[in-house]
Amino acid sequence: MRKFITSVVVLLLAVSGAFAAEMNMEKEKAKEKSAVVIAAFGTTYESTLDSLLKIEQDIRAAVGKDVPVRMAFTSNIIRKVWHERQNDAAYKAEHKNVPAYLYEVKNVLGTMADLQNAGYRNIVVQPTYLTSGEEFSDLKAYVDGLDSIKTLKDKWKPFNKLATGNPITGNYDYHEELETFAKALEKDVDLAAASSSALVYMGHGNEHLSTGIYYELEKLLNKTYPKTKIYVGTVEGHPDLDEVVGKLKADKVKKITLKPLMIVAGDHANNDMAGDEEDSWKTVFVKAGIKVTPVLEGLGENPEVRRIIVDNMLKAAAEADIKLK
C-alpha cells in the first residue's frame, strides 16, 4: 500500500511539474510576442495615403506573418478628422479604398496600449519622420518613459522590450544616414535634369530644434549630383523661403522643379508649396520670374526612402533583441 501511495505521489508531482513547466513556457512565449508601431504625423488627404500605406506594406513584408504592424498618427487634429469621418456614410462610399482602421486611428500611446492588452510585450516603434527634431524627441520620450516602468514583480511590467527606430536622416551620428538618403533621391534629380531645371525641395523644418541638417543635405546633394543645381528650404526654421529665393536669384535660375521633402504630399505640399495663395512657394517663385513645375509626390512614394525606414526598424529591433520573425 505504501508503495502504491508513493507511486501516486510521484506521478502527481511529475504531472504538476510538467504543468508548471508548460505554464512557464507559455509565460516566456507571452514575453516574446512582438509587434511594430508605425509613428506617422498623418494626413487628411486620402489621395496621399498611399505613401503611408506603402510604408506599412513594406514593413509587413519585412517581418513575420505573426507580427502585427499598426499605424499610429501623432497629430491630434488629423486623428480627429478621421474619427469624424467614421460616421460620414457619404465620405466612406466615395472613398472605398481607405482602410477601415484609419477611422479609429489612435496615437502612439493608445496603439501601444492596445497591443499590450493583447499580450504583445515587445514593441518596435518606427517613425516616418525625416529628422530627429521635436516630434522625434517627444516620441522617444514616450517610449523611453514606458520602458522605464519598474514593478515589484517582473511579470507585471507592462512591456518586456521596447525600441525606437531612427528617423530617415539618423539621430546623433547621422552623416552616413544622410549620405544614404541623398542617394535615395536620385530619381528626383533625374526628373529635374530631364526638363533642364533646378530642383527645389520644401521640407517641414523645426523651429523648436532647428539644426543645420537641411544645409548639410543641400551641400551633400549638390556634391553628389554636380550637374543639377539643388536647393533645400523649410516651412519652419532654416533655411527659409526668403533664403532659397535669394540663392536662386544669385545663381540666375529661371526654371525649377518643386517637390516636398516630406513623407506625404499633404496640406503643406498642396497649399504652402503648390497653392495659389500670395504667400505660397509657387507664387513667390513665379513673382521672382522663375518658372515652376510643382510635383505633388511624397517621399513615401520612393521605394529607396521606404527601404531606409524598414532598415531603421530592423536595426532597432536587433539592437533591442526583439525577434520579428
Image (cartoon, grey):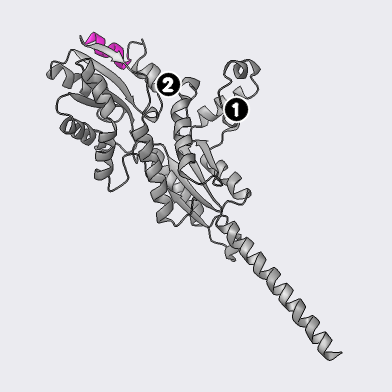
The quarter holding residue 109 reads top right
Label 1 Cα neighbours within 10 Å, binned few <14 / some 14-19 / many ≥20: some
Position of residue 56 in the picture relative to residue 33 (left or right): left
Towards the viewer: 221 or 184:
184
Q: Residue furthest bottom?
A: 2
Q: Earlier in the sequence, mark 2 or mark 1?
A: 1
**For residue 83, which numbered disc appears in the image?**
1
Given residues 35 and 208, the one toward you in this image is 35
Question: Within the magenta stretch, is there residue 282?
Answer: yes
Horizontal arrangement in the rendering, residue 148 relative to residue 303 (left or right): right
Residue carrying label 2 = 267
| Above or below: residue 93 compared with residue 132 | above
Among the 4 quarters of the image, the one containing residue 8: bottom right
Q: Position of residue 204 (x, y in %)?
A: 34, 29
Tell which of 75 and 208 is nearer to you: 75
Residue 145 lies in magenta, yes or no?
no
Amino acid type, label 1:
His
Within the image, what quadrant is residue 175 found in?
A: top left
Q: Which mark is residue 288?
A: none
Question: Which residue is found at the position 60% from the left and 24% from the top?
Answer: 84
Q: Residues within 10 Å of mark 2 (few under 14, many from 20)?
A: some
Q: Amino acid at mark 2?
A: Asp
Residue at 28% in and 42% down:
177
Residue stretch in magenta: 279-288
Q: Give the side of residue 28 with respect to residue 129, left or right.
A: right
